[in-house]
Image (spheres, rainbow, N blue to C red):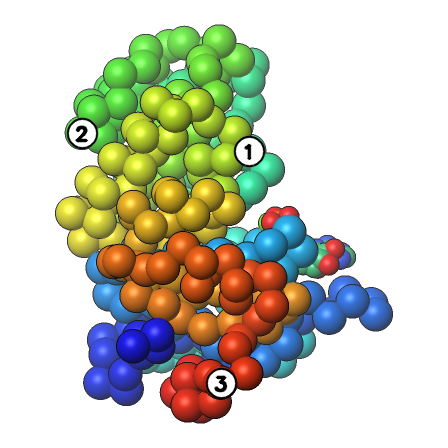
Amino acid sequence: MADAEQDDEDYVVEMEGIEKRFGEVVALEDVTLRLRRNEVLAIAGDNGAGKSTLIKCLAGAHRPDAGVIRIDGETVDIDSPRKAKRLGIETTFQDLAVAGNLTVTQNVFLGREEVQGPNTLLGVLDKGAMRERAGELLDDLKINVDVDEKVANLSGGERQLVSISRTLLSDPEIVIMDEPTSALSVEGADRVLELIDRMQDQGISIVLISHNLDHVRRAADRVHVLHQGRSAGVLDGEGVDRDDIVTRMVAGMPESGYGERAANV
Ligand SMILES: Nc1ncnc2c1ncn2[C@@H]1O[C@H](COP(=O)(O)OP(=O)(O)OP(=O)(O)O)[C@@H](O)[C@H]1O
Ligand SMILES: [Mg+2]
């Protein structure tokens, strides 16, 4: 059965009827995306399909022009990245925001003061404590990089791991990753996929955007396909047919998929 959604599921995120325009460009039209608690949901789609725009609506980087977002069943207005973080949503964006001239520790804590406020525990951590906390975080995730190393000296894969580990500092409920494996070697991608597994083991619910269908099939419980700003179906990840994903990426929802379309809305 191609469609993999039922009403009695425990959804941590529900985005319904999302629409987003940039001037004349309709980036998203009536998109409904649901993330089950503790699953890895992949979003697949061709360049320009609207993947990044969709997750930016969830991350507080864009405001949808229409639609509703619910987190844990509550309707929310995610009007800033800060609000998203407060709701337990952390994101690594496609254009990786790590600062090469800073150390691993400094990158892990970059921007945290702002998020946590000056009076919280993290706000008053001194340099030594931050170093220690960054070291613990990386150890927990079995990421073997020196916390004092400048990020510019790390490999692309290691940078990606640092960027992902940074999202875990605040103990998030939901982590969104936009193309975390795209620039990586086979080994680098393996490490990121292993990290995704470990995050899932820790109870995190994950949205993974990837062009790499092997990575999608390996990591995802379900695959949501987008085509030209519209949903092209939700497929079960395990044993998912590669051609089924590709056909939907290229041609959208199959004509015969009426029942499926009805179930997805
Ligand atoms: N800030 C923006 N201003 C104007 N148009 C935008 C903006 N962001 C995205 N778009 C347009 O919206 C559409 C969807 O873009 P989006 O970046 O979401 O695609 P994507 O699926 O992430 O693609 P890719 O696989 O290349 O990352 C595209 O037509 C894009 O040009
Ligand atoms: Mg994108």
Ligand 1 resides in the quarter of the picture at: bottom right
**What's the residue at 50%, 58% (across, down)?**
246
Which of pointers 2 and 1 lies earlier in the amino acid sequence? 1
- Asked whether mark 2 lies closer than 8 Å to ligand 2, one says no
Q: How far apart, in angstroms, are the residues tagged by discs 2 and 1?
A: 22 Å
Q: How far apart, in angstroms, are the residues tagged by discs 2 and 3?
A: 47 Å
The kind of residue tagged 2 is: Asp
- Measuring from the top left, give residue 34's x and y in whole percent: 38, 72
Residue marked by disc 3: 256
Residue marked by disc 1: 97
The kind of residue tagged 3 is: Ser
Q: Of helix, strand and loop, which one carries label 2? A: helix
The one nearer the camera, 27 or 67, is 27
- Measuring from the top left, give residue 147's x and y in whole percent: 34, 15
Q: Of helix, strand and loop, which one carries label 3? A: loop
Q: Which residue lies furthest to the right in this view?
A: 24
- Decide: few, some or many residues near mark 1? Use Cα within 10 Å; few <14, some 14-19, many ≥20: few
Q: Which mark is residue 140?
A: 2
Which of pointers 2 and 3 lies earlier in the amino acid sequence? 2
Q: Of helix, strand and loop, which one carries label 1? A: loop
Q: How far apart, in angstroms, are the residues tagged by discs 1 and 3?
A: 42 Å
